């Protein structure tokens, strides 16, 4: 696995009344805003945010707690969390995939030799939604992956209503996804990392 360049923190303020959010880490000195890869120790905070974001809407989560721990153990470098004053406010979890399209197996497997980063889930804490944090985190994540030469593209599946959101970041639709979850059907999208690798180099991110 390729080495990861350190991610710069940005000075952003935590909105009032959110100091008790899940994912708070007790430190003597906490950066106002920090982007970093997640670890298995973050799994419970990650799952709490995901549960709030998905179960109330669809009745199920893309990843459950054991799945989160699994991926954060095998490939933490393919995750990214946004922390404000030590509290997790948004996250992405990914893994590597070695086929051109997603299959049912891709939901639970990490293929170390793969060239596609499978973005499993992006979620924002309910107290921080409608603030553009999902967009900022996704942009940072694509820049983060752009610094990993082994990763050529990012692939994800989403419901049709979310396709325009991902298209803003360079994703293109490749067709209906072969993966189904219960009665839900998905669209599969892919994004080349070439441009994001260039942006990372010139911005120093």
Image (cartoon, rainbow, N blue to C red):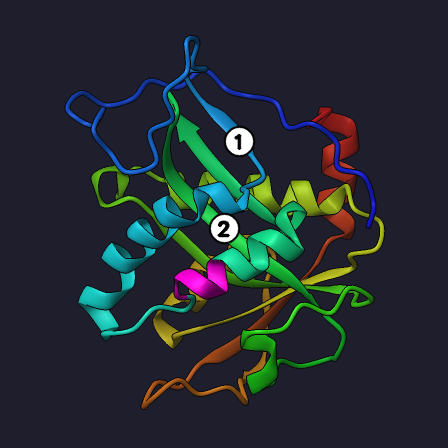
Q: Which residue is mark 2?
A: 92
Relative placement, left or right, of 82 versus 128 is: right
Residue drawn at the location 44% of the way across and 87% of the way down:
180
Q: Total label count? A: 2
Helix or strand or loop: what does disc 1 sit on? strand
How much space separates mark 2 and mark 1, taking CA atoms? 11 Å
Identified at 64% across, 28% down, the residue is 7
Does the stretch in magenta take in 187? no
Say if 128 sits above or below 171 in the image: above
Q: Position of residue 14 (x, y in %)?
A: 29, 21
Task: Check the image and report above or below for 160 versus 150.
Answer: below
Q: Nearer the viewer, residue 165 or 127?
A: 127
Badge 2 marks a residue whose secondary structure is strand
Per the picture, the main secondary structure of the magenta-coloured stretch is helix
Residue 68: which numbered mark, if any?
none
Q: Quadrant of residue 122?
A: bottom left
* Residues shaded magenta: 64-68
Pick out the residue farthest to the top. Answer: 28
**Above/below status of 67 relative to 38:** below
Does any portion of residue 167 appear in the rendered image? Answer: no
Query: Where is residue 63 drawn, in percent x and y?
Result: 43, 66
User: Residue 44 vs residue 58: left or right?
Assistant: right
Q: Residue at x 38, y 26 (%)?
A: 25
**Mark found first going from the N terminus, 2 or 1:** 1
Quadrant of residue 101 in the image?
A: bottom right
For disc 1, the marked residue is 35
Residue at the left extreme, as displayed: 17
Mark 2 closeness class: few <14, some 14–19, many ≥20 residues within 10 Å: many
Image quadrant in which the C terminus is located: top right
């Amino acid at each position: 696995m390729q080495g990861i360049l350190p991610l710069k923190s940005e000075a952003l303020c935590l909105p009032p009344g959110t100091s008790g959010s899940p994912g708070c880490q007790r430190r003597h000195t906490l950066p106002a805003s920090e982007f970093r890869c997640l670890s298995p120790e973050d799994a419970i905070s990650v799952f709490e945010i995901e549960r709030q974001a998905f179960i109330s809407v669809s009745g199920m989560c893309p990843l459950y707690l054991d799945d989160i721990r699994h991926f954060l153990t095998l490939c933490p470098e393919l995750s990214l969390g946004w922390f404000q004053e030590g509290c997790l406010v948004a996250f992405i979890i990914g893994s590597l995939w070695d086929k051109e399209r997603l299959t049912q197996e891709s939901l639970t497997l990490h293929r170390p030799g793969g060239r596609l980063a499978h973005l499993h889930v992006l979620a924002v804490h309910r107290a921080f939604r409608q603030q553009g944090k999902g967009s900022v985190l996704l942009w940072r994540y694509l820049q983060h992956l752009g610094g990993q030469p082994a990763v050529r593209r990012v692939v994800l599946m989403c419901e049709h209503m979310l396709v325009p959101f991902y298209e803003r970041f360079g994703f293109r639709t490749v067709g209906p996804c072969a993966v189904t979850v219960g009665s839900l059907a998905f669209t599969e999208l892919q994004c080349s990392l070439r441009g994001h690798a260039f942006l990372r180099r010139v911005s120093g991110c």
